[in-house]
């Protein structure tokens, strides 16, 4: 038996854990710093920018941690050749 829940009460534990991870990377981070890194690392959903439906977007701790560490975001994209010899 399971059911789906949503809302801020379901998001709070995830955001709290993400804040703890960022703080463990750099203990000198302030609350404002952590908020900024989490917001800037989030995946924007819906209309561009913050909104009342998605806030700043979906939490992406990996991206936020890379921002704290000052590492570039690297991605790999597979492509399919248009023709074979």
Image (cartoon, rainbow, N blue to C red):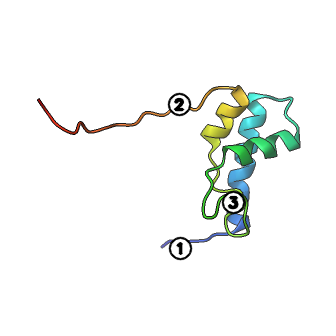
Q: Earlier in the sequence, mark 3 or mark 1?
A: 1
Q: Is residue 60 left or right of residue 28?
A: left
Name the residue at 65% across, 32% down.
66
Where does the image place residue 33, in percent across and percent down from the top left?
A: 83, 39
Would you call the spot at circle 1 few (<14 residues within 10 Å), some (14-19), or many (20 or more)?
few
Give the x, y percent position of residue 55: 72, 61
Name the secondary structure under disc 3.
Answer: helix
- Residue occupying the point 31% across, 37% down: 79
Q: Which residue is mark 2?
A: 74
Q: Quadrant of residue 29?
A: top right
- Up-down relation of residue 3 to residue 13 (above or below): below
Task: Return the x and y of residue 76 as percentages of the image width and height.
Answer: 43, 33
Q: Foreground residue, 71 or 3?
A: 71
In this picture, is 76 found above or below 11?
above
Secondary structure beneath label 2: loop
| Label whose residue precedes the other's in the sequence (3 or 2) | 3
Q: Earlier in the sequence, mark 2 or mark 1?
A: 1
Q: How far is the residue under mark 3 from the one under mark 1?
A: 16 Å
- Helix, strand, or loop for circle 1? loop
On the image, numbered disc 3 is attached to which residue? Answer: 11
Residue 19 lies, in percent from the top left, at 76, 43
| Residue designated by label 1 | 3
> Is label 2 in contact with label 1 (beta carbons under 8 Å)?
no
Mark 2 or 1: the one toward you: 2
């Amino acid at each position: 038996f399971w059911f789906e829940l949503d809302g801020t009460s379901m998001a709070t534990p995830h955001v709290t854990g993400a804040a703890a991870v960022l703080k463990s990377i750099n203990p000198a981070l302030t609350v404002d710093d952590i908020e900024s890194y989490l917001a800037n690392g989030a995946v924007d959903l819906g209309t561009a920018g913050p909104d009342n439906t998605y806030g700043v977007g979906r939490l992406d701790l990996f991206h936020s941690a890379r921002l704290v560490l000052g590492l570039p975001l690297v991605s790999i994209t597979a492509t399919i050749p248009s023709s074979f010899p």
